[in-house]
Amino acid sequence: MVVMAFGIFPCLFPAHRPLLSLQKKEIMATLDLQTSFEEIYISSMLPEDITFSCSGNVVSVELYLIPSFEKVFTADFYTYNGVAAFKDIRSIIETLMIERDMNFVTLRIVYVGDGILKYVDGIKVVFGGFKYPDGSEAFLEERFMTTSRCALVPRGRNVLLHYYSYEQQVVSCFADVYYSVPGETEGVRTFLFSIDRTRAEEEGIMRWEVDFGLLQSNMLDETGVEDTVIHAVRLGLDDREFWVYYTEEEPTEVLTFRNGYNVDEIAYIYGKKTTKTTVTKSEAVCGKLGQFYDVKATLKREIETAPIQQGEAIWLNQLFTSHHVTRKVTSGESAEVLISDVTSEVSDSNKELTRLKFSWRYADGEERED
């Protein structure tokens, strides 16, 4: 274009004066990802910043779910000294997973800048609200999706556990049962047996419901005695371990909640329950005659736990902050509840007993028979 422009005005350059040599300076377009990614993350350990180097002014970033290729996020990030930063990907992914009731996703990150399009594919994310010092992969191979290491469960009730599994992964699963036989003086015995676990058809979070009736059935097959008393069971799944202790005491309350890994967990709570009723009503007076209307009674249950250990109290705090808590009201129905008025003072002192207090009511305002 410079040469063509010069050709339009020949009189400006006399024939005896040589033309200046003009050259167009070319700048190569560049776009590079500066952040390195691992194959899998628990969401709490996603990179704090994802940075791009770009010769242009703007880097456009899009997030897609794999394999559906649904776009779930898009934004433009401006460069400063040739670098653009995408911050807070953890919050974006965790909000998405909570809204869609997901605990495992695979992502594609597409980034565009200065006319160049690139992407990173197959980033796997497992919902996890806690950091683990040994890294995401070690956590998924060594831990159940819970911060609790044991549970006190009424005899006859089930336990719900979740764990991460690769596609078609074979796991070694066992139950070490501690039991006694009424009328015999031998005391507590132990019996170890394997549990068959089906392979996962897809990679993701697997649910394991430990059925008390199945444990009893296995003990009957082993001992031939129908009334064996199961006191505890040590559950093992590869490198994962969880203890269940059974009690004759009935719990004060049983609530199911989404824990810090966005999976369901059952809380058997022992202690004291108080039901409080608040009545609101309006009054109309006509002459000397009065009448109440819009009478409404609101019930709120207040729970004070029995003395509990520090670890159990910290675990229960996930119940108080959970975005989804339900209570079983019939054999096949659960109702959502709201938790309020929480008093959680956790002590590590052997002299001061830790007791937690909270209130709950049904989210829809309707009452059910207890």
Image (tube, helix red, strand yellow):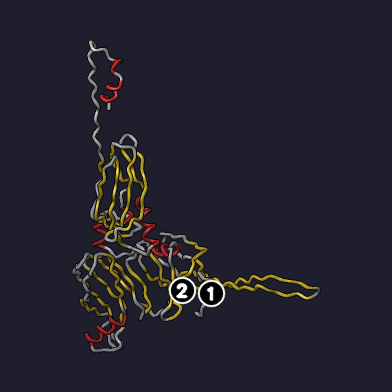
Secondary structure at numbered mark 2 = strand
Residue designated by label 2: 335
Residue 207 — which label?
none
Answer above or below: position of 352 versus 189.
Answer: above
Q: Which picture quadrant has residue 202?
A: bottom left
Mark 1 lies on a secondary structure that is loop
Residue 86, how many percent across, how many down?
34, 45
- 227 shown above or below 122: below
Please tell me which residue is depicted at 44% across the width and 61% down the height of the picture: 321
What x and y, as percent, mark residue 198? 22, 74
Measured as percent of width and height from the top left, residue 43 is found at 32, 56
Q: Residues within 10 Å of mark 1 (few under 14, many from 20)?
A: few
Viewer-nearest residue: 322 or 306: 322
**Quadrant holding the N terminus:** top left
* C-alpha separation, residue under disc 1 versus residue under disc 2: 10 Å
- Is the residue under label 2 in contact with that under label 1 (CB below 8 Å)? yes
Which amino acid lies under the numbered mark 2 shown in the image of this protein? Ala
Q: Which mark is residue 366?
A: 1
Residue 149 to residue 33: above or below: below
Which residue is nearer to you in this view: 54 or 251?
54
Q: Earlier in the sequence, mark 1 or mark 2?
A: 2
Mark 1 is on which residue type? Answer: Glu
Question: Where 234 sits versus 108, above or below?
Answer: below
Please identify the quarter of the rendering in which residue 245 is found. Answer: bottom left
Q: Residue furthest right?
A: 287
Residue for point 41% across, 71% down: 256
* Residue 61, x across and y down, in percent: 32, 47
